[in-house]
Image (cartoon, helix red, strand yellow):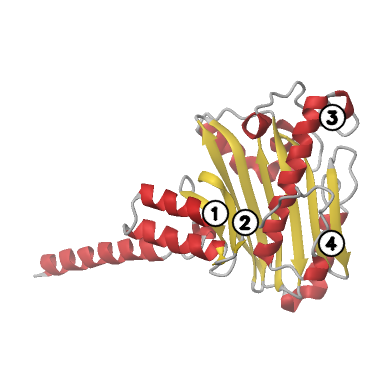
Amino acid sequence: MKKSLFISFFLIFLFLTNVNSIEWKTNDWQTKINETIRDEFKSSKKMILPLEDGEWTLVDKWSDHLFAAIQADEVTFVRFDGQTPVAYFSIGKIDNLSKWVAYISPIIQAQVFKPKEEGCRERQHYNYLKFYKKGFAHNCMVANILDVKRYLSPSDSTGDEVFTAALRNYINKNNLKMPDIYLRYFASYHSLAVRPSWYVISYGITPEAFANYKPKFTSRDTTEFHPDKIENFPEAKKVMEKWLEKSAQLHKNFEEFQTVKKYQMLDLNDILPQNYKSKNKSTKGSVTKELIKLNELYKSGALTKGEFEKAKKKVLK
């Protein structure tokens, strides 16, 4: 009798565990290492960011309860070509700041506008910088190249290497072949007029994958993409101009994802392509919502992979 009760309990436990594993993931912050997402990042039901086509694998994840109700999260996904991460997507957020705005917002301002490295301030190696700042609110965009070795193992004494330890461990454990540089887009947004959160996003892709261009020099200060050198490399200059256009489109998607107030939006007409169209909207309604429905149908088995891809292409036209 006891044995049969134990078996019944065990079977029910397995069933509930399986159900929870299916239903628990309500957003992509809950993705596990080595799990994948496709075509979009779902922060919540109302916040969905379109991604570049393809499969994105989670390689790094960090989450921490800071104090009171404040929660910090960061995830990094990559798109592989063999053992090489040819593109990456990283997003981080700190939530529930409203009650602590007087304390937290000045810290955010310092991290964004007064860091020793990078940040939203003029840097000699930045190819493009634009930002909005008023009070505690800000909207910032940067485009440049990311020196992978410098990022993963900084040679200075900032202590930043601790933040890439888990990522370095994943790279070594999986024998990944890292590229030397990425073309990088970076953005940061915080405004209590929209939500009590701070979001930071970064997207990068190798010049080879982006424009079939093999870099001649591969460090931050020697690269031909450096603003002080790029005029001497016409082909690299064309690639960077194309990247700035792409970065502007990525930032418009990020602004829509954040529902940025109109007066806070960046004027990127100097780098946006003339034929730019938002990936988040369509004449038939929200492209994002249509993609969500298609994805749900695909996951439920109602659509085959071929039918899903065909319908997705039609929505994105």
Q: Position of residue 102 (x, y in %)?
A: 82, 74
Q: Nearer the viewer, mark 1 or mark 4?
A: 1
Q: Nearer the viewer, residue 303 or 205?
A: 303
Which part of the image, by quadrant, shows the N terminus? bottom left
Residue type, numbered disc 4? Gln
Of the image marks 2 and 3, the number of the one nearer the N terminus: 3
Residue 73, labelled with which disc? none
* Mark 2 lies on residue: 279
* Mark 1 lies on residue: 316
Contact? badges 2 and 3 (CB < 8 Å)? no
* Mark 4 lies on residue: 109
Of the image marks 4 and 2, the number of the one nearer the N terminus: 4
Of the image marks 1 and 4, the number of the one nearer the N terminus: 4
Q: Nearer the viewer, residue 279 or 119?
A: 279
Name the secondary structure under disc 2: loop
Residue in view at x 17 percent, y 67 percent: 8
Residue 221, labelled with which disc? 3
